[in-house]
Amino acid sequence: MVPVAGALAPWLALTGVFVLAVGWVLLASRAAKERGPALRLAVASALLWAASGLAAYLAVYRTTGRNQYMRRFWELAFVRPDRPGFLHHTWKTVEDLVWGFVAGDPQIDRRPFVWMLHVGSVVVLALCALGILRLARARGWAAGAWLWAPRSRPSLARRSASFRLRRV
């Protein structure tokens, strides 16, 4: 059932591939310990998910990625350090996320609530920082590698082992 559910993810939302990546790391870490059925599940999932993701990319996402209108529409939605005004765009992204969570509709005029939005964004960032500290204290600073995966040196297997993952 897990491989089939995962095969649907790229078709439902492009961000599903990130959830699949985390799921596969969990499957692989379990397979490294147990072998047998867990290993077969991890391999089958990887093959099926990769085939489904590739098919979704070729059928839908590739043509959309070349569309100039879509590029302009989404240009400011992605925070890039090389863009002028990086810090302003980063802060705006945080506020957009907080506003979307609180208001539920990004079209609602936020001007009357802008000072509360600033305060709420600071509170959300502070809570995220406290969560990172809590995670680091509970699981060690190696857990921070999950937050900085592209920049870190440890392998995924060592990172997952640092969390002492257990079957629930």
Image (cartoon, rainbow, N blue to C red):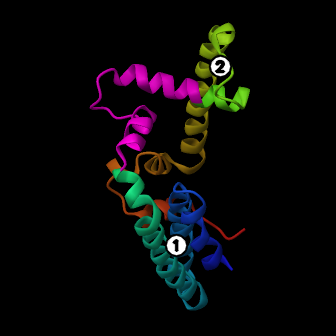
Q: Which class describes the residues within 10 Å of circle 2: few (<14), some (14-19), or many (20+)?
A: some
Magenta segment, principal secondary structure?
A: helix
Q: Earlier in the sequence, mark 1 or mark 2?
A: 1
- Residue 70 x %, y %: 42, 43
Q: Amino acid at mark 2?
A: Gly
The x, y position of residue 33, in whole percent, is 54, 80
**Which residues fall within the magenta stretch?**
67-96
Quadrant, the N terminus: bottom right
Please indicate whether residue 60 sits to the left or right of residue 82 in the image.
right
Alpha-carbon span between mark 1 and mark 2: 38 Å
User: Which residue is at 43% across, 50% downward?
Assistant: 145
Q: What residue is rendered at 38% in x and 58% in y?
A: 63
Screen quadrant of the C terminus: bottom right
**Residue identified by numbered label 2:** 120
Q: Are marks 1 and 2 in contact (CB under 8 Å)?
A: no
> Is residue 149 shown above or below 47?
above
The amino acid on which the numbered mark 1 sits, given as a three-letter code, is Ser
Residue placed most toward the observer, 167 or 124: 124
x, y percent for residue 27: 56, 74
Q: Residue furthest bottom?
A: 36
Residue 130 image position (x, y, % from top left): 60, 32
Residue at x 36%, y 58% (from the top left corner)? 154
Disc 1 target residue: 29
